[in-house]
Image: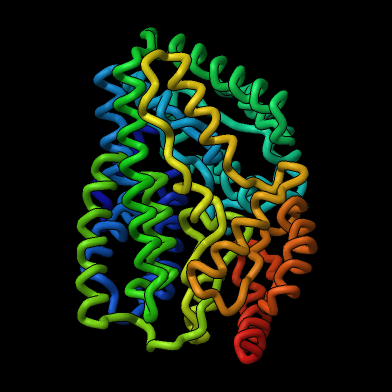
């Protein structure tokens, strides 16, 4: 059966047969993990469809925006301030890949021993299976790890690229540097869009993203209940959709889901029994196409109730002040909010440790699973400090270092089962 978007993909220059194979692989993985869950909220169909249409309807929508003169801005990290992009009428879209299928294409050029997120993202572009690559007007990277920094140098030779320098400490000097980076990004975006920010447009964009964060915060408040009304796997799907969907539309539909979750709590509807062991996932993000660890943990009988990751709380905690009157005041508020993100690139990163301990109490967590992508040294080494603190609180933990392949599923299943038996 011919996909109705094949003509669009051909015009974008994609390798359509290989692209169809990629989509079939992702769909198969989705159906046997996310789709295999029982007793899901009805509104999850909206977020499932966001993922299903991320290479179809969403791309067609972006092409319509482009025909209207809007710029499409590809991003690789939650440090990129969407507010500035939106305020100038441009559209931010996350470019990170979470599929194993594209990695061999990246390994033809890049070293094998770098993180799978970088390789999957690059592989999608190199194999001509990423529909966003040909339509973006600008790509924005950041300096949260050495692998990314060196990758940006190579990509910048081929595409219009901007790098945000994320400081490595959180002193006053670092905040000043970060504010300057935000200002330079504002100048870059104004030049790209051939227009100027206004206080009203920037304040409106801040309100839009704050509303999105409020809806996500509300969702996670529901996850504190026992039994939680939504699985951790479904919460992950929502977070992955948040990085792809139009923000106001996403918020509207998430608010509808939140209403449904409120009703599920009243009626004691859940995919889990009361008293199910409650797990925190801490560490690396799990972007679209990657559901492996969440599926294995919940298939083993536990409930993931909080994600201390960039596809979790780091994405939506902390709002931006909407009280600024001038561009400078609003940009300063944006810089201060993003500087609060607790990425492992910072040293020291005690804020992250404090937040993990706080969330363990708030979400009544029984055990922590450190989710570390291969070769992600920052999150890997940081587990040592976190585990010392967890031992003092008698909170068991398990460190999983993995990639996007299915080769280690049997081993992971055994380790997760054994860990859950200790709780």
The location of residue 280, given as percent across then percent down, is 56, 69
Residue shown at the point (75%, 51%) measured from the top left: 378
Looking at the image, residue 124 sits to the left or right of residue 30; the answer is right
Q: Quadrant of residue 397?
A: bottom right
Q: How many marks?
A: 0
373 w.r.t. 389: above or below: above
Residue shown at the point (54%, 28%) measured from the top left: 335
The location of residue 53, given as percent across then percent down, is 31, 51
Looking at the image, residue 263 sits to the left or right of residue 48; the answer is left
Q: Inspect this view and state whether residue 288 appears.
A: yes
23 w.r.t. 361: above or below: above
Q: Quadrant of residue 309?
A: bottom right
Q: Inspect this view and state whether residue 13 appears.
A: no
Of 236 and 199, the residue lying toward us:
199
User: Which coloring applies here?
Assistant: rainbow
Residue shown at the point (44%, 61%) measured from the top left: 236
Q: Quadrant of the C terminus?
A: bottom right
Q: Quadrant of the N terminus?
A: bottom left
Of 118 and 165, the residue lying toward us:
165
Of 147 and 250, the residue lying toward us:
250
Of 116 and 198, the residue lying toward us:
198
The location of residue 296, given as percent across then percent down, is 53, 77
233 w.r.t. 297: above or below: above
Looking at the image, residue 45 sits to the left or right of residue 139; the answer is left
Q: Quadrant of residue 375?
A: bottom right
The location of residue 362, given as percent across then percent down, is 49, 67
Residue shown at the point (47%, 43%) measured from the top left: 318
């Amino acid at each position: 059966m011919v996909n109705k978007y094949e003509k669009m993909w051909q015009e974008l220059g994609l390798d359509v047969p290989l692209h169809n194979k990629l989509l079939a692989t992702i769909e198969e993985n989705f159906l046997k993990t996310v789709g295999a869950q029982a007793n899901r909220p009805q509104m999850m169909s909206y977020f499932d469809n966001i993922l299903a249409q991320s290479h179809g309807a969403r791309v067609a929508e972006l092409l319509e925006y482009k025909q209207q003169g809007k710029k499409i801005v590809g991003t690789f990290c939650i440090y990129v301030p969407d507010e500035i992009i939106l305020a100038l009428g441009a559209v931010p879209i996350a470019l990170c890949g979470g599929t194993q299928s594209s990695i061999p294409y990246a390994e033809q050029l890049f070293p094998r021993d770098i993180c799978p997120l970088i390789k999957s993202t690059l592989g999608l572009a190199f194999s001509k299976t990423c529909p966003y690559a040909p339509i973006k007007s600008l790509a924005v990277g950041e300096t949260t790890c050495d692998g990314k920094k060196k990758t940006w140098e190579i990509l910048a030779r081929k595409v219009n690229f901007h790098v945000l320098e994320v400081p490595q400490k959180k002193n006053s000097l670092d905040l000043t540097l970060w504010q300057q980076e935000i200002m330079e990004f504002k100048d870059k975006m104004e030049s790209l869009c051939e227009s100027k920010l206004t206080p009203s447009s920037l304040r409106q964009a801040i309100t839009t993203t704050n509303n999105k964060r409020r809806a996500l915060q509300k969702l996670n408040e529901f996850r504190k209940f026992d039994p939680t009304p939504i699985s951790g796997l479904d919460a992950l799907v929502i977070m992955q959709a948040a990085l792809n969907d139009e923000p106001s539309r996403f918020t509207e539909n998430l608010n509808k889901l939140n209403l449904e979750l409120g009703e599920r709590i009243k009626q004691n509807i859940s995919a889990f029994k009361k008293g199910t062991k409650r797990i925190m996932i801490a560490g690396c993000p799990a972007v679209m196409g990657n559901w492996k660890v969440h599926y294995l943990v919940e298939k083993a009988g536990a409930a993931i109730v909080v994600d201390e990751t960039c596809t979790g709380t780091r994405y939506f905690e902390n709002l931006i002040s909407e009280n600024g009157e001038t561009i400078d005041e609003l940009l300063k508020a944006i810089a201060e909010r993003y500087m609060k993100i607790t990425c492992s690139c910072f040293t020291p990163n005690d804020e992250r440790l404090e937040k993990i301990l706080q969330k363990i109490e708030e979400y009544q967590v029984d055990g922590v699973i450190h989710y570390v992508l291969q070769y992600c040294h920052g999150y890997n080494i940081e587990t040592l400090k976190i585990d010392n603190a967890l031992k003092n609180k008698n909170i068991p933990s398990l460190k999983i270092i993995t990639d996007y392949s299915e080769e280690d599923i049997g081993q992971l299943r055994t380790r997760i089962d054994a860990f859950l038996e200790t709780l």
